[in-house]
Amino acid sequence: MSASRTWLLAAATLLLTTACSTPEERMAKLQIKQQRLEIKAQQAAQRNEVISKAQGAAVIDQRAPFENVLKALANCDASFAATLGQFPEALSPAFVVTRKGKIASIDVPDRRTPGRDRVAAAGSALAYGQTLSAYYDESVEINGQPQKISWGFYSPSTPEQLARILGAAIPNFKRTSRELNGNYVRMEIFDRGGWHRTTRFDYYRGQANVLGERTLVIEPSRDPAFPGSRIGCSVRGSQVAQFQDELRPEVD
């Protein structure tokens, strides 16, 4: 069958289908389409509101750009993107920083693919005398929906060294608790419309139906390419897609 005849057949089928629809069916389809457009517009407005709030939350009170970035990272929220947006030129010798309005992101090859969700520092990246050797940005998805997101930095220092030094400079790192496995953790659970700190780490980790679990962690690195430690945040739960929009507005 020629291409022109195939096109004519498809067009005729579409016209026939439309013609066979009742006025009520056509109206229902239009209503569904309108509802989808309204939802998209609402989501866009909410995202713009998050970005606007994030811009005002940028951390700028530390001595050096990467120190501001680490302090923002300790919040595990949109202030991280806002702070990156304040110092793109200063950070760019070490990492590729992409501006998105007044916020920014550090680029990785592919945040959804293990092994490609991290990038080594190309230049000097120092904060509080500690070297940041790489950046990671991970997204674990099932059926296209994020189930867990994690982001932060690698450092050749030990977790104990980082906990001591960062804890002396940044309140949220000072509030971490040391676990038996050597991790330093600060955990919050989303409940009653907000985030609430908890020390019941094992209990909530065993809950499959938690709405949201947000964790600041200093942990031993498991990546032989970047030995030492990881300093970062992770968020998991049934509402990760929503939290990603709120906490990571720089992520597409």
Image: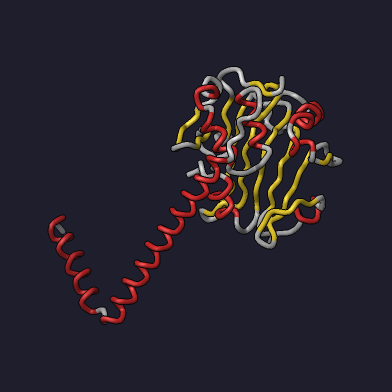
Whole-percent x and y of residue 210?
A: 69, 59
Is residue 64 or residue 112 the one in the foreground?
64
Q: Which residue lies furthest to the top in this view?
A: 124
The extreme right residue here reads: 180
Q: Residue at image x 75%, y 47%?
A: 187
Q: In which quarter of the image is residue 139?
A: top right
The colour scheme used to paint the residues is secondary structure
Decide: is 90 above or below 236. above
Residue at the image point whose x is 71% and y is 41% from the top: 216
Left or right of 124 in this view: 166 = right
Position of 72 with respect to 13 (left or right) is right
Which quadrant, please, contains the N terminus?
Answer: bottom left
Residue 225, image x, y percentages: 65, 26
Q: At 60% from the left edge and 25% from the top edge, which residue is drawn? A: 65
Q: At 67% across and 33% down in the image, what residue appears?
A: 71
Q: Where is residue 131 in the image (x, y as percent from the top left)?
A: 68, 21
Total number of numbered discs in the rendering: 0
Please say if 22 is above or below 15.
Answer: below
Q: Who is closer to the viewer here, 45 or 132?
A: 45
Residue 172 percent location from the top left of the image: 74, 39
